[in-house]
């Protein structure tokens, strides 16, 4: 708590120190103008003082500096023309300072109000992310997990990428997906799918039946009044048994998982991909359940296309399998941390699309 207060006070102290600059400028211009020959007028330079103050000060600071500039201009006029008090030239300069100062005060007030609104929007978006897309638990039965969501826009904390996990009597069911589009509509569709998954995954339904239910849920939402345009969601749904066995999977147009063992990544082959969720009413798909091995000591990597379609400055896509080859981290958190750093290095610190990543490690289960 004290550390946060200290961090908050440092910018305030810095701003107060910066006020010395425009005040020193006002003093310097005033002294030189009073001592200068009668045909030289430096008073117009005083406007620079309130003009630079918004760079570090708020409306009250700007108003104070502007008032000091007006006082300085008035003093200059009185000292230079003691017989006439103030000439028409000085009166015009004072009026200009008043107008500029008032405009800058209004500008700073509007800027602070918008900054406050932006902070509120950030708070709401962060709260929405925690509710709609909370991080996965670090433990799901014998599984160790680590998850990460990276927003493409700095001000946006949540988008259409999604993931969730549900424990069942025999294992863990997971979903990772990506909603077509952005904005509130994508967030709504992601929340709808996650709610449907959490509701149905608890039931003892076959994996194919679960995916068919998810597709119907998305299709029904698209039929609601007010929905326009085409929407679909690519997704992979997995069923990971607690005991050693093959992972069962249905892939709906989503990038395939990657299994990593001893620094050697292997992309899971998807022989019977299904169309994305929300297009079932057009394609009438049959959901084929596929399987692949996942043993202790291996890591399972799930991700969205914001990872594989991330480009560097030359336009080259992120080569996932090539980049992670040779990584020997066996802890999901450590692997994910290195994964994030490597991805951001590849794109130069800025993503063009949202990205979600999940790393899962299988522990050793004891016999019953």
Image (cartoon, rainbow, N blue to C red):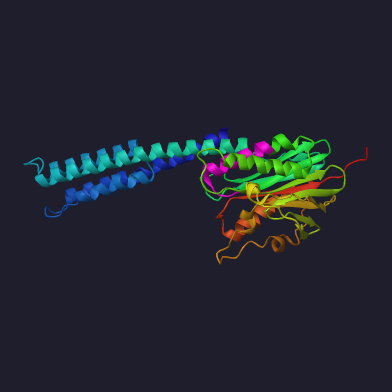
Q: Residue at x 75, y 42 (%)?
A: 209
Relative depth, front residue between 166 and 22 = 166
Q: Residue at x 57, y 35 (%)?
A: 127
**How far from the left and from the top, in percent, is residue 194?**
66, 39
Residue 78's x, y, as percent? 13, 41
181 part of magenta stretch:
yes
What range is drawn magenta here?
179-196
Residue 157 in view (yes/no): no
305 sits to left or right of 227: right
Q: Is residue 134 left or right of residue 52?
A: right
Residue farthest to the bottom, as pictured:
314
**In the image, residue 262 above or below residue 356:** below
Residue at 72%, 51% (x, y): give it.
251
| Count of number-bearing discs | 0
Query: Would you say the magenta stretch is mainly helix, strand or loop?
Result: helix
Q: Identify the residue shown where x is 58% and y is 32%.
A: 1
Residue with the most extreme left position: 83
Percent coordinates x, y for residue 276 in the rendering: 65, 50
Q: Which quarter of the rendering shows the C terminus?
A: top right
Image quadrant assignment for residue 2: top right
């Amino acid at each position: 708590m004290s550390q946060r207060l200290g961090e908050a006070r440092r910018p305030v102290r810095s701003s107060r120190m910066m006020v010395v600059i425009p005040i020193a400028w006002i003093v310097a211009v005033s002294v030189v103008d009073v001592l200068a020959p009668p045909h030289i007028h430096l008073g117009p330079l005083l406007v620079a003082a309130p003009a630079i103050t918004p760079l570090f000060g708020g409306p009250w600071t700007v108003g104070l500096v502007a008032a000091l500039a007006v006082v300085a201009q008035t003093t200059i006029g009185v000292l230079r023309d003691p017989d006439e008090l103030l000439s028409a030239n000085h009166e015009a300069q004072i009026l200009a300072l008043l107008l500029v100062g008032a405009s800058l005060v209004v500008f700073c007030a509007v800027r602070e109000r918008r900054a406050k609104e932006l902070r509120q929007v950030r708070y709401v978006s962060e709260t929405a992310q925690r509710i709609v897309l909370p991080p996965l638990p670090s433990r799901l039965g014998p599984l160790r997990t680590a998850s990460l969501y990276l927003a493409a826009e700095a001000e946006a904390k949540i988008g259409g990428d999604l993931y969730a996990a549900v424990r069942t009597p025999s294992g863990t069911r997971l979903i990772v997906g990506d909603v077509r589009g952005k904005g509130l509509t994508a967030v709504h569709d992601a929340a709808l799918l996650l709610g449907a998954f959490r509701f149905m995954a608890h039931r003892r339904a076959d994996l194919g039946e679960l995916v068919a239910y998810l597709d119907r849920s998305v299709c029904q939402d698209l039929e609601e009044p007010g929905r326009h345009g085409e929407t679909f969601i690519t997704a992979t749904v997995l069923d990971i048994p607690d005991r050693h066995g093959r992972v069962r999977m249905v892939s709906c147009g989503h990038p395939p998982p990657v299994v990593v063992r001893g620094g050697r990544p292997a992309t899971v082959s998807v022989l019977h991909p299904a169309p994305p969720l929300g297009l079932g009413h057009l394609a009438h798909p049959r959901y084929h359940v596929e399987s692949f091995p996942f043993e202790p000591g291996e890591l399972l990597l799930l991700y969205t296309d914001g990872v594989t379609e991330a480009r560097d400055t030359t336009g080259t896509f992120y080569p996932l399998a090539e980049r992670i080859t040779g990584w020997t981290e066996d802890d999901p958190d450590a692997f994910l941390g290195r994964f994030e750093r490597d991805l951001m290095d590849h794109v130069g610190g800025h993503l063009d699309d949202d990205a979600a990543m999940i790393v899962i490690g299988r522990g050793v289960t004891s016999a019953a």
